């Protein structure tokens, strides 16, 4: 499992996709937190020690990656720093898309403008044509699921998907209390943690 996780991590770093890096980090640390909570509840010191070791190992790996001390990691690490420092051109494109999406939502807050319409803004939004970012953002969508759902489905669509997320969280949390052995808890995490990570991704 450690070898498989290492291969997957290297693949994500090689792709230089910042979203995938954040998404993976959320999933890993969320898993560690839930396993730690369950191990305390079951009074399993062995599992707690393993969680601590995994968490420290993950933090060490992140620090090594961000340090740029390994030449293969230098380019992906620079992409992260560019985003944090606001030096990435794609950041400004996203800000324009988010601003446009919020404007569309405020114009039609209840039912939205319809699914799939966020990539067609250039056809019906006069304000789109006068922004310097418009030519480089044609057909890109919103690049944020929350704003996309708000603009396309309005408050009705947001209410439906948040109800779904609430049910996922409730059922999973109940399962955590029902799981009395490692096998059942492992099966629960293998399904629930990806759902929670996807829920977190919805906001960025």
Image: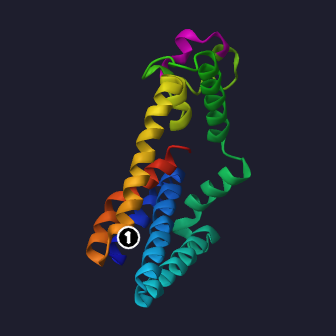
Res. 144 visible in picture: no
Where residue 90 sits, quadrant-wise, is: top right
Question: Measured from the top left, where is residue 191 in percent x and y?
Answer: 32, 58
> On the image, numbered disc 1 is attached to which residue?
5
Find numbered disc 1 in the image and state the secondary structure of the residue it sits on: helix
Q: Is residue 122 highlighted in magenta?
A: yes
Q: Is residue 38 above or below residue 121?
A: below
Pointer 1 local density, CA inside 10 Å: few below 14, some 14–19, many at least 20: few
Q: Residue at x 54, y 53 (%)?
A: 18
Q: Which quadrant would the N terminus be assigned to in this image?
A: bottom left
> Residue 25 versus residue 138: which sits nearer the camera?
25
Q: Which quadrant would the C terminus be assigned to in this image?
A: top right
Question: Measured from the top left, where is residue 96 in percent x and y?
Answer: 66, 29
Where residue 3 sits, quadrant-wise, is: bottom left
Q: Name the outermost residue toward the bottom.
A: 45
Res. 85 visible in picture: yes
Q: Main secondary structure of the magenta part?
A: helix
Q: Residue at x 66, y 45 (%)?
A: 88
Q: Is residue 124 above or below residue 16?
A: above
The boundaries of the magenta stretch are 119-127
Q: Is residue 122 above or below residue 146?
A: above
């Amino acid at each position: 499992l450690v070898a498989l996780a290492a291969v997957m991590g290297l693949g994500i770093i090689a792709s230089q996709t910042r979203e995938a890096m954040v998404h993976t980090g959320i999933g890993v640390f969320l898993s560690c937190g839930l396993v730690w909570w369950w191990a305390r509840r079951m009074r399993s010191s062995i599992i707690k020690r393993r969680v601590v070791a995994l968490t420290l190992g993950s933090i060490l790996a992140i620090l090594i990656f961000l340090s740029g001390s390994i030449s293969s990691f230098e380019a992906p690490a620079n992409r992260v720093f560019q985003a944090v420092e606001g030096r990435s051109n794609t950041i400004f494109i996203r800000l324009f898309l988010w601003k446009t999406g919020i404007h569309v939502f405020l114009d039609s807050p209840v039912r939205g403008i319809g699914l799939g319409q966020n990539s067609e803004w250039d056809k019906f939004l006069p304000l789109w044509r006068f922004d310097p970012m418009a030519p480089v953002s044609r057909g890109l969508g919103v690049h944020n699921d929350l704003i996309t759902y708000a603009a396309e489905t309005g408050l009705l669509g947001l209410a439906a998907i948040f109800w779904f997320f609430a049910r996922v969280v409730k059922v999973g949390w109940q399962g955590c209390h029902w799981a009395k052995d490692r096998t059942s808890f492992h099966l629960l995490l293998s399904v629930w943690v990806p759902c929670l990570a996807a829920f977190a991704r919805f906001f960025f």
